[in-house]
Amino acid sequence: MTGPVLRVENLRVQLPNRRGILTAIDNVSFAIEPGEVLGIVGESGAGKSMTGAANIGLLEPPLRVAGGRISLAGRRIDNLPDGAMRRIRGREISAIFQDPLTSLNPLYTVGRQLVETIRTHLDLPPAAARERALSLLREVGIAGGDQRIDHYPHQFSGGMRQRIVIALAIAANPRLIIADEPTTALDVSIQAQIIALLKRLSRDHGTAIMLITHDMGVIAETAHRVAVMYAGRIVEIGKVREIVGNPRHPYTRGLMGSIPRIGGARGRLRQVEGAMPRLNEIPPGCPFNPRCPEAFDGCRQRRPELMPTGSGSAACWLYDKSAASMAAVADG
């Protein structure tokens, strides 16, 4: 196909409450091309998982998409009725969640769950569906699939269960996979295997992957591009090598400075002072300004939009020439 698999334009998610309406996701835009892995990274509460849930139509009420547009392969999907969205989930969009036990039924064998998923989305007879299930188990690296297909989820390790969830996710050859913290509950060696599997899926099948995580190491190893979120907004987006090697936004620099490095001089790790603001306490101007060591008066008054920074973009007044000049004059 030509064009992005997923295009999100000015997405806004709101939460009505007794005191009014809170904006949880505010004017988020990005696109994911076929075979591309886009990493979504940020602290807890930044809006990463909510962005993923909005794209797959799984926001929990009273959360709702209040504005913007979500398109899958050129077709708008954010305004579809529930029945139409259910037909898209699994067939064209799949999800991988942090805890595989939430995606697997403990009462059914993994083979039964795979076969039911395959037959729900593909027109295959039972024998052919079982053969495809065995093929999927082999593809995700589960040895002895002929025997293990009839085992129950509790008979597999955590890493093996996550592989089964990935097999379920790719059962109908979806265009897009939303992977929400797929390696967080796994030890480091299993994480590396799952990362390698996701990279192979994007490369061999042309699957677009939205990889949601708080782990910059996973992003650096897996993603082609990365979007950094803060307080429901994207504050920086660009190629992963550039953002990891030369972060532009002060928040991104803080995230990268808090990661220990092997080799070189050993000093104290930097940290981002303060905490993510609550939805009802997001400050005016740049939402990061109370925690930013480089904030000036303009940051407290006006909200910055994404501005070009080389091949990427950052929502920071430091990259607006007029605002930076005013700050220099004010500093004196």
Image (cartoon, rainbow, N blue to C red):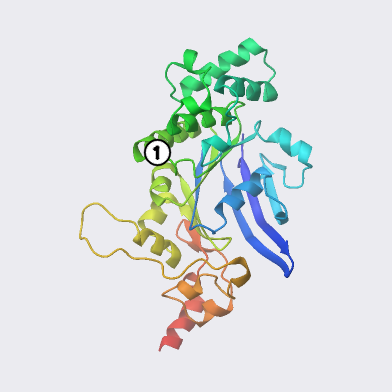
Say whether residue 213 is left or right of residue 281.
left
Q: Residue at x 43, y 61 (%)?
A: 252
Q: Residue at x 45, y 87 (%)?
A: 330
> Taking the image as drawn, is residue 249 in sight?
no
Say whether residue 171 is left or right of residue 82.
left
CA neighbours of label 1 inside 10 A, class few (<14), some (14 to 19), many (20+): some
Number of numbered tags placed on the structure image: 1
The percent position of residue 278, horizontal first and vertical second, equals 58, 67
Query: SS class of the residue under badge 1?
Result: helix
The percent position of residue 4, horizontal first and vertical second, equals 60, 42
- Quadrant of the image occupied by residue 199: top left
- Residue kind at label 1, given as amino acid type: Gln
> Taking the image as drawn, is residue 127 in sight?
yes
- Residue closest to the eye, 330 or 181: 181
The percent position of residue 326, horizontal first and vertical second, equals 49, 83
Q: Residue furthest top?
A: 127
Residue wearing tag 1: 191
Give above or below for 121 relative to 223: above
Give above or below for 209 relative to 330: above
The percent position of residue 99, horizontal first and vertical second, equals 52, 40
Q: Residue furthest bottom?
A: 332
- Residue closest to the eye, 217 or 1: 217
- Quadrant of the image occupied by residue 45: bottom right
Tell me the quadrant of the picture where the C terminus can be found.
Answer: bottom left
